[in-house]
Amino acid sequence: MNFELTEEQLMIRDSARDFAQAEIAPSSVERDIKSEFPADIIKKLGELGFMGMMVPPEYGGAGLDTISYVLAMIEVSKVDASVGVIMSVNNSLVCYGLEKYGTGYIKEKYLTPLAKGEKLGAFALSEPEAGSDATKQKTTADRQGDCYAINGIKNWITNGQSADYVLVMATTDKSKGHHGISTLIVEKGTPGFGYGKKEDKLGIRSSDTSSLTFTNCCVPVSNLVWEEGKGFNFAMNTLNGGRIGIAAQAVGIAEASLDAAIKYSKERKAFGQHISEFQAIQFKLADMAVKVDAAKLLTLKAAALKDAGKKHYKEAAMAKLFASKIAVECALEAVQIHGGYGYVREYLVERYLRDAKITEIYEGTNEIQRIVIARALMDEY
Ligand code: CAA
Protein backbone atom coordinates (compact mmCIF):
# COMPACT_ATOMS: atom_id res chain seq x y z
CA MET A 1 0.00 0.00 0.00
CA ASN A 2 1.32 3.41 -0.99
CA PHE A 3 0.06 6.60 0.67
CA GLU A 4 2.25 8.89 -1.47
CA LEU A 5 0.60 11.08 -4.06
CA THR A 6 2.34 11.35 -7.43
CA GLU A 7 3.94 14.59 -8.64
CA GLU A 8 1.04 15.05 -11.03
CA GLN A 9 -1.59 14.52 -8.32
CA LEU A 10 0.16 17.02 -6.05
CA MET A 11 0.32 19.52 -8.89
CA ILE A 12 -3.41 19.16 -9.60
CA ARG A 13 -4.23 19.56 -5.89
CA ASP A 14 -2.08 22.68 -5.63
CA SER A 15 -3.46 24.30 -8.75
CA ALA A 16 -7.05 23.61 -7.57
CA ARG A 17 -6.11 25.14 -4.19
CA ASP A 18 -4.57 28.24 -5.78
CA PHE A 19 -7.52 28.71 -8.10
CA ALA A 20 -10.02 28.28 -5.27
CA GLN A 21 -8.27 30.83 -3.07
CA ALA A 22 -7.71 33.38 -5.82
CA GLU A 23 -10.86 33.05 -7.91
CA ILE A 24 -13.59 31.39 -5.85
CA ALA A 25 -13.10 32.67 -2.30
CA PRO A 26 -13.52 36.43 -2.93
CA SER A 27 -17.14 36.14 -4.13
CA SER A 28 -18.30 33.14 -2.08
CA VAL A 29 -20.08 35.06 0.71
CA GLU A 30 -21.93 37.37 -1.66
CA ARG A 31 -22.97 34.52 -3.96
CA ASP A 32 -24.29 32.58 -0.96
CA ILE A 33 -26.36 35.57 0.20
CA LYS A 34 -27.70 36.31 -3.28
CA SER A 35 -28.04 32.64 -4.39
CA GLU A 36 -26.00 33.64 -7.43
CA PHE A 37 -24.79 30.98 -9.87
CA PRO A 38 -20.98 31.23 -10.39
CA ALA A 39 -21.07 31.22 -14.20
CA ASP A 40 -17.70 32.99 -14.67
CA ILE A 41 -15.96 30.70 -12.18
CA ILE A 42 -17.34 27.58 -13.86
CA LYS A 43 -16.13 28.90 -17.23
CA LYS A 44 -12.61 29.38 -15.84
CA LEU A 45 -12.67 25.96 -14.16
CA GLY A 46 -13.53 24.54 -17.58
CA GLU A 47 -10.63 26.35 -19.25
CA LEU A 48 -8.29 24.81 -16.66
CA GLY A 49 -9.61 21.30 -17.32
CA PHE A 50 -11.51 20.85 -14.04
CA MET A 51 -14.91 20.19 -15.62
CA GLY A 52 -13.90 17.05 -17.51
CA MET A 53 -11.03 15.85 -15.37
CA MET A 54 -11.27 12.12 -16.08
CA VAL A 55 -12.29 12.34 -19.74
CA PRO A 56 -9.55 11.37 -22.24
CA PRO A 57 -7.97 14.31 -24.12
CA GLU A 58 -9.41 13.01 -27.44
CA TYR A 59 -12.83 14.05 -26.09
CA GLY A 60 -11.69 17.36 -24.65
CA GLY A 61 -10.91 16.17 -21.13
CA ALA A 62 -7.83 16.39 -18.92
CA GLY A 63 -7.22 12.60 -18.92
CA LEU A 64 -6.56 12.48 -15.17
CA ASP A 65 -7.38 9.82 -12.58
CA THR A 66 -10.13 9.78 -9.96
CA ILE A 67 -7.60 10.46 -7.17
CA SER A 68 -6.72 13.80 -8.83
CA TYR A 69 -10.43 14.54 -9.18
CA VAL A 70 -10.98 13.85 -5.46
CA LEU A 71 -8.05 16.11 -4.50
CA ALA A 72 -9.37 18.93 -6.67
CA MET A 73 -12.92 18.47 -5.37
CA ILE A 74 -11.66 18.74 -1.78
CA GLU A 75 -9.78 21.98 -2.47
CA VAL A 76 -12.67 23.60 -4.33
CA SER A 77 -15.30 22.49 -1.78
CA LYS A 78 -13.11 23.66 1.07
CA VAL A 79 -13.57 27.16 -0.25
CA ASP A 80 -17.07 26.87 -1.73
CA ALA A 81 -19.17 23.71 -1.66
CA SER A 82 -21.62 25.21 -4.16
CA VAL A 83 -18.91 25.32 -6.80
CA GLY A 84 -17.93 21.80 -5.68
CA VAL A 85 -21.31 20.28 -6.47
CA ILE A 86 -21.56 21.97 -9.88
CA MET A 87 -18.13 20.58 -10.75
CA SER A 88 -18.96 17.14 -9.33
CA VAL A 89 -22.19 16.66 -11.27
CA ASN A 90 -20.56 17.66 -14.57
CA ASN A 91 -17.53 15.41 -13.99
CA SER A 92 -18.94 12.30 -12.36
CA LEU A 93 -22.57 12.05 -13.34
CA VAL A 94 -22.56 13.58 -16.80
CA CYS A 95 -19.09 13.27 -18.41
CA TYR A 96 -18.32 9.87 -16.89
CA GLY A 97 -21.64 8.41 -18.02
CA LEU A 98 -21.33 9.72 -21.57
CA GLU A 99 -17.75 8.57 -21.90
CA LYS A 100 -18.54 5.07 -20.66
CA TYR A 101 -21.88 4.52 -22.38
CA GLY A 102 -22.20 7.10 -25.17
CA THR A 103 -21.93 6.41 -28.90
CA GLY A 104 -19.18 8.02 -30.99
CA TYR A 105 -21.74 10.62 -32.09
CA ILE A 106 -22.68 11.42 -28.47
CA LYS A 107 -19.03 11.69 -27.45
CA GLU A 108 -18.29 14.03 -30.32
CA LYS A 109 -21.38 16.20 -30.07
CA TYR A 110 -22.07 16.29 -26.32
CA LEU A 111 -19.19 14.90 -24.26
CA THR A 112 -16.45 16.99 -25.89
CA PRO A 113 -17.93 20.45 -25.14
CA LEU A 114 -18.98 19.26 -21.67
CA ALA A 115 -15.48 18.03 -20.87
CA LYS A 116 -13.92 21.24 -22.17
CA GLY A 117 -16.24 23.20 -19.89
CA GLU A 118 -17.80 25.00 -22.87
CA LYS A 119 -21.15 23.47 -21.96
CA LEU A 120 -22.63 22.42 -18.62
CA GLY A 121 -24.49 19.21 -17.86
CA ALA A 122 -27.20 18.04 -15.45
CA PHE A 123 -28.42 14.61 -14.38
CA ALA A 124 -32.18 14.20 -14.00
CA LEU A 125 -33.20 11.09 -12.08
CA SER A 126 -35.24 12.31 -9.07
CA GLU A 127 -38.94 13.01 -9.40
CA PRO A 128 -41.63 14.32 -7.03
CA GLU A 129 -42.53 10.70 -6.17
CA ALA A 130 -39.25 8.96 -6.99
CA GLY A 131 -36.42 10.17 -4.77
CA SER A 132 -34.81 7.38 -2.76
CA ASP A 133 -37.13 4.89 -4.46
CA ALA A 134 -35.63 5.79 -7.81
CA THR A 135 -37.00 2.80 -9.75
CA LYS A 136 -40.50 4.36 -9.60
CA GLN A 137 -39.94 6.71 -12.53
CA LYS A 138 -43.13 8.34 -13.80
CA THR A 139 -41.50 10.35 -16.59
CA THR A 140 -42.13 8.60 -19.89
CA ALA A 141 -40.35 8.64 -23.25
CA ASP A 142 -42.50 7.27 -26.08
CA ARG A 143 -40.83 6.32 -29.32
CA GLN A 144 -42.43 8.21 -32.19
CA GLY A 145 -40.61 7.47 -35.45
CA ASP A 146 -37.06 8.72 -35.16
CA CYS A 147 -37.57 10.53 -31.86
CA TYR A 148 -38.73 10.05 -28.27
CA ALA A 149 -41.46 12.25 -26.82
CA ILE A 150 -40.69 12.92 -23.16
CA ASN A 151 -43.40 13.79 -20.63
CA GLY A 152 -42.97 14.28 -16.90
CA ILE A 153 -41.36 16.29 -14.11
CA LYS A 154 -37.90 16.03 -12.56
CA ASN A 155 -37.07 17.44 -9.13
CA TRP A 156 -34.02 18.72 -7.23
CA ILE A 157 -31.88 18.90 -10.35
CA THR A 158 -28.43 20.35 -9.72
CA ASN A 159 -27.45 22.77 -12.54
CA GLY A 160 -31.12 22.48 -13.62
CA GLN A 161 -31.68 25.86 -15.26
CA SER A 162 -28.00 26.48 -16.03
CA ALA A 163 -27.26 23.25 -17.89
CA ASP A 164 -26.96 23.13 -21.65
CA TYR A 165 -27.52 19.37 -21.77
CA VAL A 166 -29.56 17.26 -19.37
CA LEU A 167 -29.40 13.48 -19.02
CA VAL A 168 -33.00 12.46 -18.43
CA MET A 169 -34.01 9.06 -17.08
CA ALA A 170 -37.44 8.14 -18.45
CA THR A 171 -39.59 5.03 -18.85
CA THR A 172 -39.66 3.72 -22.39
CA ASP A 173 -41.43 0.45 -21.49
CA LYS A 174 -43.58 0.46 -18.35
CA SER A 175 -44.13 -3.30 -18.42
CA LYS A 176 -40.45 -3.93 -17.67
CA GLY A 177 -40.20 -1.98 -14.39
CA HIS A 178 -36.75 -0.53 -13.85
CA HIS A 179 -35.49 -2.48 -16.87
CA GLY A 180 -37.82 -0.31 -18.96
CA ILE A 181 -36.06 2.95 -18.03
CA SER A 182 -33.78 4.68 -20.58
CA THR A 183 -31.42 7.66 -20.58
CA LEU A 184 -31.86 10.47 -23.12
CA ILE A 185 -29.91 13.69 -23.69
CA VAL A 186 -32.10 16.78 -23.85
CA GLU A 187 -30.69 20.07 -25.05
CA LYS A 188 -31.64 23.37 -23.42
CA GLY A 189 -34.19 25.14 -25.62
CA THR A 190 -35.76 21.97 -27.01
CA PRO A 191 -39.50 22.70 -27.47
CA GLY A 192 -41.49 21.18 -24.61
CA PHE A 193 -38.57 21.39 -22.15
CA GLY A 194 -39.32 23.91 -19.40
CA TYR A 195 -38.42 24.86 -15.86
CA GLY A 196 -40.35 24.69 -12.62
CA LYS A 197 -39.25 26.52 -9.53
CA LYS A 198 -35.66 27.26 -8.61
CA GLU A 199 -35.23 26.08 -5.02
CA ASP A 200 -34.48 28.52 -2.19
CA LYS A 201 -32.10 26.32 -0.19
CA LEU A 202 -30.60 26.12 3.30
CA GLY A 203 -27.08 25.63 1.92
CA ILE A 204 -25.09 25.36 -1.32
CA ARG A 205 -27.11 28.43 -2.20
CA SER A 206 -24.93 29.53 -5.09
CA SER A 207 -25.64 26.30 -6.97
CA ASP A 208 -28.78 26.05 -9.08
CA THR A 209 -31.31 23.42 -7.99
CA SER A 210 -34.49 23.37 -10.04
CA SER A 211 -37.34 21.22 -11.18
CA LEU A 212 -37.63 20.51 -14.88
CA THR A 213 -40.76 19.91 -16.92
CA PHE A 214 -41.17 17.91 -20.12
CA THR A 215 -44.30 18.20 -22.27
CA ASN A 216 -44.16 16.26 -25.51
CA CYS A 217 -40.48 17.16 -25.62
CA CYS A 218 -39.08 15.37 -28.67
CA VAL A 219 -35.45 14.30 -28.79
CA PRO A 220 -33.83 12.32 -31.59
CA VAL A 221 -33.24 8.57 -31.18
CA SER A 222 -29.52 9.30 -31.59
CA ASN A 223 -29.63 10.94 -28.14
CA LEU A 224 -30.32 7.61 -26.45
CA VAL A 225 -27.41 6.73 -24.15
CA TRP A 226 -26.36 3.04 -23.95
CA GLU A 227 -29.51 1.08 -24.87
CA GLU A 228 -33.25 1.19 -24.29
CA GLY A 229 -33.93 -0.27 -20.84
CA LYS A 230 -30.44 0.40 -19.50
CA GLY A 231 -31.25 3.81 -18.00
CA PHE A 232 -31.55 2.65 -14.41
CA ASN A 233 -28.29 0.71 -14.54
CA PHE A 234 -26.72 3.77 -16.18
CA ALA A 235 -27.92 5.95 -13.29
CA MET A 236 -26.71 3.53 -10.61
CA ASN A 237 -23.31 3.00 -12.22
CA THR A 238 -22.66 6.70 -12.66
CA LEU A 239 -23.91 7.46 -9.13
CA ASN A 240 -21.19 5.18 -7.73
CA GLY A 241 -18.61 7.63 -9.09
CA GLY A 242 -20.83 10.56 -8.14
CA ARG A 243 -20.84 9.43 -4.52
CA ILE A 244 -17.03 9.59 -4.50
CA GLY A 245 -17.31 13.21 -5.68
CA ILE A 246 -19.83 14.08 -2.94
CA ALA A 247 -17.66 12.34 -0.33
CA ALA A 248 -14.77 14.58 -1.49
CA GLN A 249 -17.04 17.62 -1.25
CA ALA A 250 -17.91 16.63 2.33
CA VAL A 251 -14.22 16.14 3.19
CA GLY A 252 -13.56 19.66 1.88
CA ILE A 253 -16.27 21.15 4.11
CA ALA A 254 -14.99 19.19 7.13
CA GLU A 255 -11.40 20.27 6.50
CA ALA A 256 -12.47 23.91 6.15
CA SER A 257 -14.35 23.60 9.46
CA LEU A 258 -11.28 22.18 11.20
CA ASP A 259 -8.98 24.87 9.78
CA ALA A 260 -11.37 27.63 10.83
CA ALA A 261 -11.74 26.15 14.32
CA ILE A 262 -7.95 25.90 14.84
CA LYS A 263 -7.39 29.45 13.58
CA TYR A 264 -10.13 30.93 15.75
CA SER A 265 -9.11 29.02 18.87
CA LYS A 266 -5.57 30.41 18.55
CA GLU A 267 -6.89 33.98 18.23
CA ARG A 268 -9.71 34.04 20.77
CA LYS A 269 -8.88 34.64 24.40
CA ALA A 270 -11.05 33.72 27.39
CA PHE A 271 -10.22 33.40 31.07
CA GLY A 272 -6.82 34.92 30.41
CA GLN A 273 -5.56 32.56 27.71
CA HIS A 274 -6.16 31.50 24.11
CA ILE A 275 -9.04 29.03 24.05
CA SER A 276 -6.76 26.63 22.11
CA GLU A 277 -5.00 26.06 25.43
CA PHE A 278 -8.09 24.54 27.02
CA GLN A 279 -8.22 20.77 26.84
CA ALA A 280 -11.96 20.89 26.11
CA ILE A 281 -11.16 22.71 22.84
CA GLN A 282 -8.07 20.59 22.09
CA PHE A 283 -10.11 17.36 22.37
CA LYS A 284 -12.69 18.72 19.96
CA LEU A 285 -9.96 19.63 17.46
CA ALA A 286 -8.28 16.24 17.86
CA ASP A 287 -11.56 14.39 17.22
CA MET A 288 -12.24 16.56 14.17
CA ALA A 289 -8.76 15.86 12.76
CA VAL A 290 -9.20 12.09 13.15
CA LYS A 291 -12.57 12.23 11.41
CA VAL A 292 -11.27 14.34 8.51
CA ASP A 293 -8.37 11.97 7.93
CA ALA A 294 -10.52 8.85 8.11
CA ALA A 295 -13.06 10.31 5.68
CA LYS A 296 -10.31 11.35 3.28
CA LEU A 297 -8.76 7.89 3.35
CA LEU A 298 -12.12 6.19 2.69
CA THR A 299 -12.71 8.55 -0.23
CA LEU A 300 -9.26 8.01 -1.71
CA LYS A 301 -9.66 4.24 -1.32
CA ALA A 302 -12.92 4.30 -3.31
CA ALA A 303 -11.21 6.48 -5.94
CA ALA A 304 -8.20 4.14 -6.14
CA LEU A 305 -10.48 1.13 -6.68
CA LYS A 306 -12.33 2.98 -9.43
CA ASP A 307 -9.02 3.90 -11.09
CA ALA A 308 -7.93 0.26 -10.90
CA GLY A 309 -11.15 -0.73 -12.72
CA LYS A 310 -12.34 -2.66 -9.66
CA LYS A 311 -15.78 -2.88 -8.11
CA HIS A 312 -16.21 0.18 -5.89
CA TYR A 313 -19.91 0.67 -5.22
CA LYS A 314 -19.70 -0.42 -1.56
CA GLU A 315 -16.60 1.70 -0.91
CA ALA A 316 -18.16 4.74 -2.64
CA ALA A 317 -21.25 4.38 -0.43
CA MET A 318 -19.07 3.99 2.68
CA ALA A 319 -17.04 7.08 1.80
CA LYS A 320 -20.14 9.17 1.14
CA LEU A 321 -21.91 7.92 4.29
CA PHE A 322 -18.95 8.61 6.57
CA ALA A 323 -17.65 11.80 4.99
CA SER A 324 -21.07 13.47 4.95
CA LYS A 325 -21.72 12.51 8.57
CA ILE A 326 -18.42 13.91 9.77
CA ALA A 327 -18.81 17.05 7.63
CA VAL A 328 -21.94 17.88 9.62
CA GLU A 329 -20.23 16.95 12.91
CA CYS A 330 -17.10 19.00 12.18
CA ALA A 331 -19.12 22.01 11.03
CA LEU A 332 -21.22 21.82 14.21
CA GLU A 333 -18.10 21.66 16.37
CA ALA A 334 -16.56 24.58 14.49
CA VAL A 335 -19.68 26.63 15.19
CA GLN A 336 -19.54 25.60 18.87
CA ILE A 337 -15.87 26.60 19.18
CA HIS A 338 -16.67 29.99 17.63
CA GLY A 339 -19.49 30.50 20.16
CA GLY A 340 -21.79 33.38 19.22
CA TYR A 341 -19.49 34.32 16.33
CA GLY A 342 -20.15 30.90 14.83
CA TYR A 343 -23.82 31.72 14.51
CA VAL A 344 -23.45 34.82 12.34
CA ARG A 345 -22.29 35.43 8.80
CA GLU A 346 -19.17 37.31 9.87
CA TYR A 347 -17.38 33.97 10.16
CA LEU A 348 -17.71 31.29 7.50
CA VAL A 349 -18.49 28.36 9.78
CA GLU A 350 -22.26 28.98 9.77
CA ARG A 351 -22.17 28.44 6.00
CA TYR A 352 -20.10 25.29 6.36
CA LEU A 353 -22.84 23.89 8.59
CA ARG A 354 -25.59 24.84 6.13
CA ASP A 355 -23.58 23.44 3.20
CA ALA A 356 -22.63 20.23 4.99
CA LYS A 357 -26.18 19.01 5.54
CA ILE A 358 -26.98 18.37 1.88
CA THR A 359 -24.10 15.90 1.57
CA GLU A 360 -26.13 13.54 3.78
CA ILE A 361 -29.08 13.82 1.41
CA TYR A 362 -28.20 14.05 -2.27
CA GLU A 363 -26.78 11.33 -4.56
CA GLY A 364 -28.56 8.88 -2.26
CA THR A 365 -29.44 9.68 1.36
CA ASN A 366 -27.29 8.12 4.03
CA GLU A 367 -30.07 5.63 4.69
CA ILE A 368 -29.76 4.54 1.03
CA GLN A 369 -25.96 4.28 1.40
CA ARG A 370 -26.53 1.90 4.32
CA ILE A 371 -28.83 -0.22 2.12
CA VAL A 372 -26.15 -0.37 -0.59
CA ILE A 373 -23.43 -1.28 1.94
CA ALA A 374 -25.55 -3.89 3.73
CA ARG A 375 -26.57 -5.55 0.45
CA ALA A 376 -22.92 -5.70 -0.62
CA LEU A 377 -22.03 -7.32 2.71
CA MET A 378 -24.76 -9.94 2.23
CA ASP A 379 -23.45 -10.68 -1.27
CA GLU A 380 -19.86 -11.00 -0.01
CA TYR A 381 -20.54 -13.50 2.75
N1 CAA B 1 -24.32 0.19 -8.36
C1 CAA B 1 -24.69 -0.49 -9.47
N2 CAA B 1 -25.92 -1.03 -9.60
C2 CAA B 1 -26.78 -0.86 -8.59
C3 CAA B 1 -26.47 -0.15 -7.42
C4 CAA B 1 -25.16 0.39 -7.32
N3 CAA B 1 -24.76 1.09 -6.25
N4 CAA B 1 -27.55 -0.15 -6.61
C5 CAA B 1 -28.52 -0.82 -7.25
N5 CAA B 1 -28.06 -1.25 -8.44
C6 CAA B 1 -28.74 -2.03 -9.48
C7 CAA B 1 -29.05 -3.45 -9.00
O1 CAA B 1 -27.93 -4.28 -9.22
C8 CAA B 1 -30.24 -3.80 -9.87
O2 CAA B 1 -29.78 -4.10 -11.18
P1 CAA B 1 -30.47 -5.27 -12.07
O3 CAA B 1 -31.94 -5.25 -11.77
O4 CAA B 1 -30.12 -4.92 -13.47
O5 CAA B 1 -29.82 -6.55 -11.60
C9 CAA B 1 -30.98 -2.47 -9.98
O6 CAA B 1 -30.03 -1.46 -9.68
C10 CAA B 1 -32.14 -2.35 -9.00
O7 CAA B 1 -31.62 -2.57 -7.71
P2 CAA B 1 -32.51 -3.18 -6.55
O8 CAA B 1 -33.22 -4.40 -7.05
O9 CAA B 1 -31.60 -3.33 -5.38
O10 CAA B 1 -33.62 -2.04 -6.38
P3 CAA B 1 -34.19 -1.38 -5.08
O11 CAA B 1 -35.34 -0.57 -5.53
O12 CAA B 1 -34.41 -2.38 -3.99
O13 CAA B 1 -32.99 -0.40 -4.59
C11 CAA B 1 -31.77 1.68 -4.70
C12 CAA B 1 -32.46 0.56 -5.45
C13 CAA B 1 -30.38 1.21 -4.31
C14 CAA B 1 -32.54 2.10 -3.46
C15 CAA B 1 -31.71 2.84 -5.71
O14 CAA B 1 -33.03 3.22 -6.06
C16 CAA B 1 -30.97 4.06 -5.21
O15 CAA B 1 -29.75 4.08 -5.26
N6 CAA B 1 -31.72 5.09 -4.78
C17 CAA B 1 -31.11 6.38 -4.48
C18 CAA B 1 -31.20 7.24 -5.71
C19 CAA B 1 -30.18 8.31 -5.73
O16 CAA B 1 -29.03 8.13 -5.34
N7 CAA B 1 -30.59 9.47 -6.21
C20 CAA B 1 -29.69 10.58 -6.37
C21 CAA B 1 -30.23 11.51 -7.37
S1 CAA B 1 -28.98 12.32 -8.31
C22 CAA B 1 -28.41 13.58 -7.35
O17 CAA B 1 -28.68 13.70 -6.20
C23 CAA B 1 -27.45 14.46 -8.04
C24 CAA B 1 -27.34 15.80 -7.46
O18 CAA B 1 -28.18 16.62 -7.56
C25 CAA B 1 -26.11 16.20 -6.75
Image: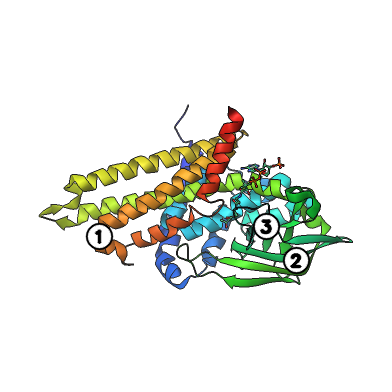
Amino acid on which disc 1 is placed: Gly
Q: Please tell me which residue is depicted at 48% across the width and 53% down the height of the picture.
A: 359
Label 2 beta carbon within 8 A of ligand 1: no
Amino acid on which disc 2 is placed: Asn
Q: Give the farthest residue toward the left.
A: 272
Classify residue 121 as left or right of residue 299.
right
Residue count near mark 3 (Cα–Cα under 10 Å), binned few <14, some 14–19, many ≥20 = many
First in sequence: mark 2 or mark 3?
Answer: 3
Q: Please tell me which residue is depicted at 39% across the width and 40% down the height of the picture.
A: 293
Provide residue 254's location: percent of width, then percent of height.
39, 50
Q: Which disc, if any, is residue 339?
A: 1
Amino acid on which disc 3 is placed: Pro
Quadrant of the rendered image containing residue 148: bottom right
Nearest to viewer (mark 1 / mark 2): 2
Numbered disc 1: secondary structure: helix
Which quadrant holds the C terminus?
Answer: top right
Provide residue 90's location: percent of width, then percent of height.
60, 55
Is residue 72 at all visible to an observer of this figure? Answer: no
Numbered disc 2: secondary structure: strand
237 w.r.t. 40: above or below: above
Classify residue 210 as left or right of residue 107.
left
- Label 2, label 3: how many angstroms apart (C-alpha)? 27 Å
Provide residue 160's location: percent of width, then percent of height.
61, 65
First in sequence: mark 1 or mark 2?
Answer: 2
First in sequence: mark 3 or mark 1?
Answer: 3
- Label 1, label 2: how many angstroms apart (C-alpha)? 50 Å
Provide residue 87's location: percent of width, then percent of height.
55, 55
Q: Write down the residue under mark 2.
A: 151
Q: Write down the residue under mark 3.
A: 113
Quadrant of the rendered image containing residue 25: bottom left
